[in-house]
Image (cartoon, helix red, strand yellow):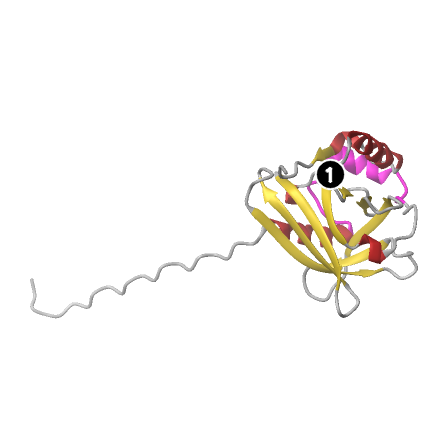
Amino acid sequence: MTGGRTTPPAEAKPAEPRPRVPKLTVAALALLIAGLGVVGGVRQSRRRSAGTLAPPVPARSVDLDRYLGRWYEFARYDSWFEHNDEGVTAEYSLRPDGLIRVVNASRSGSPTGRVRWAEARARVVPGSANAKLKVAFFGPFFIGNYWVLDHAEDYTWSIVGEGSRRYLWILTREPVPAPDVQAMLIARVESFGYDTTLLHLTRQPPG
């Protein structure tokens, strides 16, 4: 042993925790990419059916004031960014700048699971009778497509898609629509050229 001083090793700093990205934020990014038509990972059967049909055409105009408010997801085309999500809701409200505020929420794994959420802005596509919107979840770029393909006269249900038919959402004002309404909505979706065997029926929280 020598009598020289030794310098104790510097204490390693603990690694800073990596920020958690909400799952619906990832979903938002995928929706934006969907607006460009370049999202991968979609079931091959859906790609084939989407590629052989002309884009769906919205059936009617949309009164935005009546469309605002809370919607519950009754069913959807399941995708990797929404996989295992239940209790999905969407809330639309008018912003002071005239854009539409979009707040999406879901629960992970079950209707009572951990809440995930994402916020976005939407603007109407000119000449679309308010039936087509562009959505921006990140930055100033409105590139996500949101097409209201059809809706009830009293705005109690809505069918939302986009031009490629790779994504589909069926929304209702009630957490669980009546059985006859469910059957009607599935038939209406099929009339737009969607494969209803791919539908995921979303479970909503009890009560």
Q: Position of residue 207 (x, y in %)?
A: 63, 38
Q: Position of residue 34 (x, y in %)?
A: 75, 50
Apparent side of residue 30 relative to residue 17 in the rendered image (left or right)? right
User: What residue is shown at x 10% (from left), y 70% (from top)?
Assistant: 4
Label 1 belongs to which residue? 74
Query: Based on the displayed image, in which of its 4 quarters is residue 47 positioned?
Result: top right
Q: Dot 1: what SS?
A: strand
Q: Amino acid at mark 1?
A: Phe
72 or 36, which is in the foreground?
A: 72
User: What residue is shown at x 74% (from left), y 56% (from top)?
Assistant: 92
Quadrant for the N terminus, please: bottom left
User: What residue is shown at x 78% (from left), y 55% (from top)?
Assistant: 68
Q: Position of residue 205 (x, y in %)?
A: 62, 39
Query: Based on the displayed image, in which of its 4 quarters is residue 2 positioned?
Result: bottom left
117 or 206, which is in the foreground?
A: 206
Q: Does the magenta run of residues contain 160? A: no
Q: Which residues are magenta?
A: 36-56
119 or 175, which is in the foreground?
A: 175
